[in-house]
Amino acid sequence: MKRSLALLMVLVLMIAMLAGCAQSSKEDQTVVIYQNKVEIHEQLSAFAALYEAETGVKVTVKTSGGDSPYAENLKAEFQSDRQPDIYVIEGMGGYNTWESKLTPFEDQEWMDLTTLEFVVDGKTFGFPVAVEAWGMAYNADLLSQAGIDPATLTSQEAYRAAFEKIDAMKADLGIKSVVAMAAGPDMRWVTGLHNFNGYLSAGLPYADTSVLDKLNNGEADMQRLTEYADWVELLFEYADRSVLLTGNYDAQVGQFGTGQSVFIHQGNWIDPWLVSNGIDFPMGFAPHASVKGEHNAIFIGAPSFYVINKDSENKEAANAFLNFMATNEAGHNYMVNEAKMVPAFTNVELKPDTPLSANAAEWLAKDAKYTWLQNDMPDGFGMGTIAPIYESYAKGDIDKAEFINQLAIKIEELK
Amino acid sequence: MNRHVKDKLVFWLFLAPALISFLVVVIIPFFMGLFYSMTDWTAVAGLKANWVGLENYKAMFSSVAFKYSFMRTFLFTLLSVLSINFVALTFAFLVTREIRFKNFYRAGFFIPNLIGGLVLGYIWQFIFKSVVPAIGSLLGINFLEELLLLADPNLTLFGLILAFTWQYAGYIMMIYVAALLNVPQELLEASEIDGANFWQKLWNITVPMIAQAFTITSFLTLVNSFKQYDIIVALTSGGPTAIYQGQTVNSTELLAVHIYNVAFKYNNMAEGQARAIVFFLVLSVVSIGQVYYSKKREVEM
């Protein structure tokens, strides 16, 4: 009897041990920031250490991103009860997912210093991490050799004339194709998000969401869509076929970087690639002529926003940290010189030193910007649903009419 | 306490660790998954899942992308099971003959299996995108130089099968090698004396004797082809596109990739879960059927 009792005790102990694993000790009060940019992890950690030295508040930077998908890891982080105080969302999609875990910013100093914060129903929910911009990035040397002034590239007609002229001079310029454009399986964000954003916001006043709202209600603006298809056709027509259909990021940026194309359909995030490969020809952005009419702005926005966890116990400390980043010179130094980002705040006087970022900052200073709406479409719509249609069009499986038709059908399915 | 009860207690006590782990990590999650597949669950902590009945399953069967993915998965599985087993068996015959350096060859054929699927996918992507055109331009073959292998749905599927065969055939070969070494030599000798030729020996002695190996290899290749994910992600990311029933679909988005995309790219966890349940059922039926059929063909010595 005694022995079986002992056995029973062992069993109970084992179960207790299993259960014990679930308990965790309470951590010291620190602000935990869970962010998605692998490339700035070290810089941000260094800045957090500096902040701790200055104020005594410990900030822990946790990073997940690059190849490990941030959105999934964030869900796991919340499920596992290691809730971060500050985390990152990328627009309406993230807002819809995380609505129950968000709290608006109120009366923060940084809110008066930017126009790029994330707002829903008049409440500010997101602190802009950085500014990114894309347009038609051009190689200024090649463009002047071809005798084209980038300031004239403001409409589809101007682009078509310029493309034809450059295409005829291919051998003289030593290029393979006019545009480095990619629509293959690895590059769905270029077509489904960035290029399609032209349909949503090009030519419209900043923060005009009328086309996006229609799209989210399952309505396609057929006039705009038809004009937009001309732009897509133009880009595909003058692109290199192998880069267009099967190229990856390196192939596309490499084509531009090695002077084998005059234009590239990318944004200022290609700067680090260009710098690390020692490319230093002068370059800048020209507007996308996504629809008919004159265009004098490039797409500028914040790719991601810091948001505060509603259930955080350190909201005050988290807010103080973000304010410090936006208002203190050390924060500015971190954003511009360390992390090589274009800051979203008007009080920052430091200038980015990489070519496309510097050009993006100029466009921002002129306030010549079209809205970023590509992250406010339903999840998966841009890259998953419509981007394959671009690829089929690029391959020639479908013609322009069918391209317009399929896009319209997919938009109507959103109803 | 009598001896019988005590034995039982000890039995259950020793079983407990395995049983509890199995319950906690397999059985309970399985039923949770079944439940979530009938809700609008999003995996966001703190949100309650609402019951939607069979809506997710209905959405699945009306999805063109899912139907297409299903067909392509079966096609891929069929072709790669054939290709892997053919290559593996051929290699196994070669390296069990009396040749020099046979252990070197065995190791060589096996090594690709030690490379992870992602790395391997990128290697083959490089080969298809850069090496093939380079060879074309070197030899002056325009067709090869301009061949965009990964832009054609069918060529890409063959590319995938090639990469997967290259990775997996060596492993399957090892199983065949072990089986071939166990075929009794006296039977082969006896048949030789009776005047049997190579093909008669192969078909009437070797094949029945290694039928057990066939059971295991066809099971392994079938299941692993059906579940293929990492090579696809690295090599093709689901592309290129094809047109199916008037819609643009991703030609190499096989079921595992498709389920992942629905769950995570479209943030539609519950629908992805419903598809995963169907995936599980189909795979179970197919693989149990295969094992049952193969078992019947095995012979006992």
Image (cartoon, coloured by chain):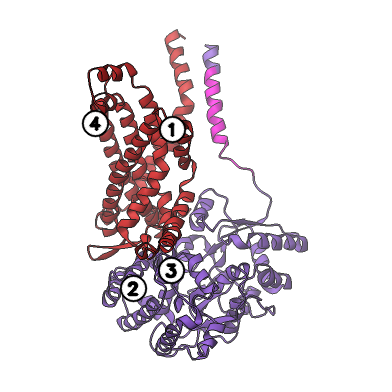
Chain colours: A purple, B red
Residue under pointer 3: A243
Of the two numbered discs 4 and 2 in the rendering, the one whose residue sits closer to the viewer: 4
**Residue drawn where x is 38% and y is 33% of the image:** B94
The dot on residue B22 is 1
Name the chain letter of the residue that bears numbered label 4. Answer: B
The crowd level at tag 2 (other Cα within 10 Å; few <14, some 14-19, many 20+) is some
Q: Which mark is residue B293?
A: 4
In the foreground, A158 or A209: A158
The magenta-colored residue range is: A7-25
* Amino acid type, label 4: Tyr
Task: Pinpoint the chain carrying mark 2.
Answer: A
* Amino acid type at mark 1: Phe
Residue B38 appears in the rendering: no
**Gap in Å between the C-alphas at discs 4 and 3?**
48 Å
Establish if A236 lies above or below A159: above
* Distance from the alpha carbon under mark 1 to that under mark 4: 28 Å
Q: Chain of mark 1?
A: B
* Dots 3 and 1 on the same chain: no
Q: Position of A168 compared to B198: left or right? A: right
Residue type at mark 2 is Asn
Q: CA distance from mark 1 to mark 2?
A: 46 Å
Q: Which residue shows up at 46% across the image and 31% down it?
A: B100
Coordinates of residue B58 in the picture (x, y in percent): 25, 54
Asked if the residue at tag 3 contacts the one at tag 2, i.e. Cβ–Cβ closer than 8 Å, the answer is no
